[in-house]
Image (cartoon, rainbow, N blue to C red):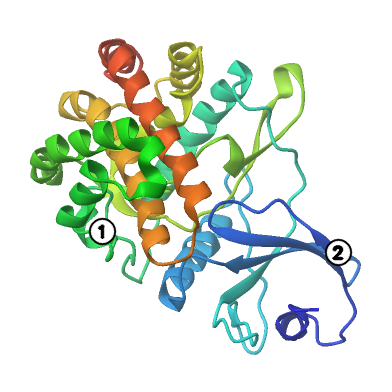
Amino acid sequence: MPFDHTLLHYFPDGRWDIEEGLSGWNNTTRFVRAGGRKWVLRIYETHRDIDKIRYEHEILEALGAAEPSYRVPRPAKFGGGNTIARLTDGTDRLACVFSYIEGRRPEEGEERTAVALGAAVSELMRDLSALKISSSPVYRPYYELESAYPHCSSERVGEFCSSPPPEFAGEAVALQAIGEAYREFRGHLPNFRSLPHQLIHGDLNDSNILVEGEGDTYRVGAILDFEFCTWDLRAMELAVIVSGYLDRDNAIDLIERFLCGMGGHIQLEASEIEAVPLLVRLRLLDVFLHFLNRYFDGVDQEPTLKEQIRSVYRGLQSLENVSDQLERVIRRHLGGE
């Protein structure tokens, strides 16, 4: 098996069973049964930077020690406290093992999940703001777009969007709109630096949580995938989640339920509330650049990038339709009115 040498670090008796897991866009996941327990093996596909994973694991250790009401992944240790192994298959990929967390994936687009996520996010934001982390973040804030993606200079992005390669001719309209949004947006980036900052998860959506219970006991039982946790705009946590609702027919209803779930525990400054629609656009553009960079780097192929182009285009269209409503509902729930 390709992961046997890696698993030997964690389970030196060599006894385990591997099951296929749900893998996301960025990583490969396998479920492992060993030592009478269930574990999760994660293979990082996006990068080979061990410092990024060390920072993620430091966050997880600190959050777990704080004993929040939700659970977070706990990295397994081996060899004197190491949590990260390097694959020996010639790819130089990095891997780790987490203890398995019971729970179920929510059905996407459910209003009850939006409420539950709001409650969990308000607690998570408070918890992250209180953490004392000795290491420096490796990922840059969202608004530092141009330093985050080495293959995506503004010139190269502009050229790709205005004159796409023949294989992307079918996405020309979407790319034109994305390119225009990117050009217009770059002028706003310096203004974000003065807004409140804190540690944020940075990638929260229905696929990165587990839920439990039914009816009145329905809640978020676990928050997963802290890979992109970094020091960023406080309001960016909200913007990331809002962006994930935009492709739903009931987008504003879901956003309203999410904000209700936050229950007034988090209040944003007026400048943050005004910035949220722009930050949602920033998230959408960041998703596009993330996958464009992976395409240029040879990690992803045409079908993956095409799917993301269409998704980002739909998100930008939806944001344009709900932008005014979005600011009003955020002000009502998080503006202290």
Is residue 238 toward the left or the right of residue 197 in the image? right
First along the sequence among labels 1 and 2: 2
Which of the 4 image quadrants contains residue 8? bottom right
Label 2, residues with CA under 10 Å away: few <14, some 14-19, many ≥20: few
Q: Position of residue 93 (x, y in %)?
A: 56, 77
Is residue 262 toward the left or the right of residue 322 in the image? right
SS class, disc 1: loop
Distance of mark 1 from mark 2, alpha carbons?
43 Å
Which of the 4 image quadrants contains residue 88? bottom right
**Closer to the camera, 199 or 113?**
113
Label of residue 37 in the image: 2
Label of residue 152 in the image: 1
Residue furthest out toward the front: 166
Identified by mark 2, the residue type is Arg
SS class, disc 2: strand
Quadrant that contains the N terminus: bottom right
Q: Is residue 16 above or below residue 214?
A: below
**Which residue is pictured at 75% across the width and 38% down the height?**
104
Identified by mark 1, the residue type is Cys
Q: Closer to the observer: label 1 or label 2? A: 1
**Which residue is pictured at 81% across the width and 87% down the height?**
12
**Which residue is pictured at 23% across the width and 45% down the height?**
163
Quadrant that contains the C terminus: top left
